[in-house]
Image: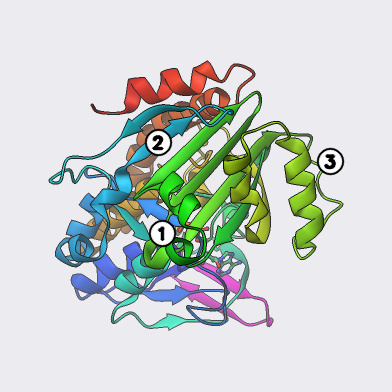
Amino acid sequence: MRRRIAVVGAGPAGLTFARVLHRHDHPVTVLERDAAADARPPGGTLDLHEGLGQRALAKAGLLAEFQVLSRPEGQAMRILDVDGTVLRDWRPRPDERANPEIDRGQLRDLLLGPLDVRWGHGVTRAAPGSGGGTAVHFADGREETFDLVVGADGAWSRVRPAVSPVTPRYTGVTMVESSLDDVDARHPDLARLVGDGSVAVHGVNRALVAQRNSGGHVKVYAQFRAPLDRHTRVGPADVEAVRSELLTLFEGWAPHVLDLLRHGTAFARHPLHALPASHTWAHVPGVTLLGDAAHLMPPLGAGANLAMLEAAELAESVAAGPEDLDESVRAFEQRMWARAGRWAQITTAGLERLVSPDPREALALFDRVQPS
Ligand SMILES: Cc1cc2nc3c(=O)[nH]c(=O)nc-3n(C[C@H](O)[C@H](O)[C@H](O)COP(=O)(O)OP(=O)(O)OC[C@H]3O[C@@H](n4cnc5c(N)ncnc54)[C@H](O)[C@@H]3O)c2cc1C
């Protein structure tokens, strides 16, 4: 008998889970709060690791399509000091496929493919019942029961309280995101600065990172240590106020680096939060978590990768149709916790070094992880 499975959230975790089940002809209900796939900007580029995100796409039968869409040249990385001196200029070999980049919107559309998502279905909570099955409660007051509810609803998950009382904590680092469009034609100097991939500039307790997306779009991330409440006064809509606040924070940096902020548009503030590095819970039959809902960590290139691989693995074990669905979810959780715990420690330590009182820490980290 086929189990009734629901996944809450159509991000990388939820869509990978649903797509792998779909490949195995197993029905799944995808519940997403957004009104449509393009209801909000999809965000910046993601690098998908060979052993994580790319493995998940292989399990979904989508690796070949990913290879057509992705940008191996986007792995290029340049590091500058605050005076604008180039300290490292790493470029991938033409055949390097370890971590190619893909726009989030392209990844979403690739995963969506034939999936039937129930858009505009905001979930308020999941309530596991004593007789098996978990009720999903919707924002409009309705509810529906499933044999398994998978919470893939991100950092501020509404499913998570069904298994764990833990909530994300502020890391001490805030990120303000901005964008540049049509950079090759409109800002050729910045296009050269960013190159095919990313440029990162590290100062004292501050960093500025710019990443090329497809179509001449560049995302700029200003990161700095600040109290959580210090930067809530200015709303993201107040572009000039945010710009001037950032230019003050990064004062003294090379003018051509600061042009990334001077020409940026659409500022969005992300105070970086994380769950504890070893976030586990006493298993609750009928409900589990995937991705950021389970293990939100600093954004150092692992979150979407982990979310996708664990989603694909859970989907495969559900589709394999064991007698005891609950037993396979329980085993999956153990594997997820072990792997995510290791990455949470790596990314937490990484954030400390990338936005650090000593900018040499960031360079040392780059030299340690970057293949040469
Ligand atoms: C600036 C930045 C850069 C990053 N770069 C990388 C990178 O290069 N590589 C990498 O691997 N990771 C990266 N990450 C991390 C990555 O974005 C996340 O780990 C990843 O998106 C997690 O996927 P998810 O599906 O678990 O959650 P999400 O992507 O957050 O998706 C959750 C989905 O659930 C929906 N939802 C939320 N609440 C509800 C609700 N109540 N009811 C119904 N639906 C709901 C949301 O609308 C959303 O569609 C980055 C993060 C940031 C902030």
CA–CA distance in space, label 3 to label 2: 31 Å
Q: In percent of the image, x 17 and y 40: which residue is there?
A: 93
Q: Secondary structure at mark 2?
A: strand
Judge left or right: residue 353 versus residue 228. left
Is residue 324 visible in the rendered image? The answer is no
Q: Dot 3 corresponds to which residue?
A: 230
Q: Position of residue 75 (x, y in %)?
A: 31, 44
Q: In percent of the image, x 34 and y 54: which residue is there?
A: 308
Of the two numbered discs 3 and 2 on the same chain, state the one appearing first in sequence. 2
Q: Position of residue 51 (x, y in %)?
A: 22, 42
Q: Dot 1 corresponds to which residue?
A: 213
Magenta range is 134-147
Of the two numbered discs 3 and 1 on the same chain, state the one appearing first in sequence. 1
The CB of the residue at mark 2 lies under 8 Å from ligand 1: no
Q: Quadrant of residue 225?
A: top right
Main SS, magenta region, reads strand
Q: How busy is the neighbourhood of tag 2: few (under 14 within 10 Å), some, or many (20 plus)? A: many
CA–CA distance in space, label 3 to label 1: 30 Å
* Residue 181 is inside the magenta segment: no
Between residue 209 and residue 233, name the one nearer to us.
209
| Amino acid type for the residue under numbered disc 2 | Arg
Q: In percent of the image, x 63 and y 43: which residue is there?
A: 258
Q: Secondary structure at mark 3?
A: loop
Relative vertical location of residue 77 with respect to residue 131 in this rendering, above or below: above
Of the two numbered discs 2 and 1 on the same chain, state the one appearing first in sequence. 2
Q: Dot 2 corresponds to which residue?
A: 78
Between residue 91 and residue 101, name the one nearer to us.
91
| Amino acid type for the residue under numbered disc 1 | Asn
